[in-house]
């Protein structure tokens, strides 16, 4: 199965993709995570992507389609994948169609996580993750049971993304509306677009997605 989660920054794509991965054995392909790993490793792609990401703009279609095409060839992707953060432009969506045809794979569903921009700024600026296991938390909505201690692994180090500032989130939202939202009619036209309410509680969104699959 190939599934795309489409939504603005902070819509909950990563959270829901992790849950789908755990429950259905699908592989979460987060292009944001891949780029952050490349930045941390100081690779050529990472060096090029770093400043673009810090401005809240989009990395080039050529780099992104290359990364995804290579990743889809890995054997673990045979189980099925959840695309989290890709495609983000019409050029990426068209390139994805072509690469899936070449790889004899097919796209099953595109799930739009509908949200309201005002809430997204608060969601994104308050989020942080456990530096050890990657579990996600939020200053207001999802605090660890014991203050400063990860519920999952008991780690005590946490990190925040450098692009989760109010200013960068606004620019990322603009990129979403200008460049990514046009994908909604693109996939609607193919008859594979579905929607969930991304403003609902995390568990409720999971149930809505499960009902669609
Ligand atoms: P995310 O973790 O999905 O919010 O992505 C973080 C940042 O990585 C974005 O703001 C973009 O700068 C970059 N990025 C991630 N995925 C893509 C993509 N498919 N196309 C272009 N840029 C991307």
Image: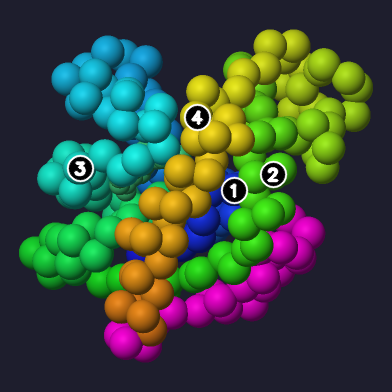
Q: Quadrant of residue 179 in the image?
A: bottom left
Helix, strand or loop for disc 1:
loop
Q: Quadrant of residue 151 in the image?
A: top right
How crowded pointer 1 is (Cα within 10 Å; few <14, some 14-19, many 20+) is rated as many
The answer as to whether callout 3 falls within 8 Å of ligand 1 is yes
Which label was assigned to residue 133?
none
**Which region of the structure is painted magenta?**
189-213
Pick whichever of labels 1 and 2 is earlier in the sequence. Answer: 1
Which label was assigned to residue 123?
2
Q: Can you give x and y, in whole percent of width and height, for residue 29 in the image? A: 39, 46
The answer as to whether callout 4 falls within 8 Å of ligand 1 is yes
Measured along the vertical axis of the image, is residue 116 above or below residue 146? below
Helix, strand or loop for disc 3:
loop
Q: How far apart are marks 1 and 4 (CA)?
A: 12 Å
* Residue 81 seen in the figure: no
Measured along the vertical axis of the image, is residue 190 above or below residue 149? below
The answer as to whether callout 1 falls within 8 Å of ligand 1 is no
Q: Can you give x and y, in whole percent of width and height, for residue 77 in the image? A: 31, 50
- Circle 2/circle 4 CB separation < 8 Å: no
Specify the quadrant that holds the C terminus: bottom right
> Dividing the image into four equal quarters, which quarter contains ligand 1?
top left
Which mark is nearer the camera, 1 or 4?
4
Between 115 and 24, the one lying in front of the other is 115
- Circle 1/circle 4 CB separation < 8 Å: no
Pick whichever of labels 2 and 3 is earlier in the sequence. Answer: 3
Helix, strand or loop for disc 4:
loop
Residue lying at 41% horizontally and 67% vertically, measured from the top left: 181
Q: Mark 3 points at which residue?
A: 60
Residue lying at 50% horizontally and 79% vertically, measured from the top left: 194
Which label was assigned to residue 163?
4
């Amino acid at each position: 199965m190939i599934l795309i989660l489409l939504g603005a920054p902070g819509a909950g794509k990563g959270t829901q993709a992790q849950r789908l991965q755990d429950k259905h054995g699908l592989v979460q392909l987060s292009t944001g995570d891949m780029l952050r790993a490349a930045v941390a490793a100081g690779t050529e792609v990472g060096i090029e992507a770093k400043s673009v990401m810090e401005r809240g703009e989009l990395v080039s279609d050529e780099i992104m389609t290359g990364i995804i095409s290579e990743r889809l060839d890995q054997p673990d992707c045979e189980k099925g994948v959840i695309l989290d953060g890709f495609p983000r432009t019409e050029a990426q969506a068209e390139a994805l169609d072509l690469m899936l045809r070449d790889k004899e794979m097919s796209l099953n569903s595109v799930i739009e996580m509908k949200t309201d921009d005002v809430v997204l700024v608060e969601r994104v600026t308050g989020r942080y993750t456990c530096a050890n296991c990657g579990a996600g938390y939020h200053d207001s909505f999802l605090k660890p049971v014991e203050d400063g201690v990860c519920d999952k692994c008991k780690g005590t180090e946490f990190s925040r993304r450098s692009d989760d500032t109010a200013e960068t989130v606004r620019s990322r939202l603009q990129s979403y509306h200008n460049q990514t939202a046009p994908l909604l009619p693109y996939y609607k036209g193919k008859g594979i677009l579905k929607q969930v309410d991304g403003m609902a509680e995390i568990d409720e969104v999971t149930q809505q997605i499960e009902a669609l699959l």
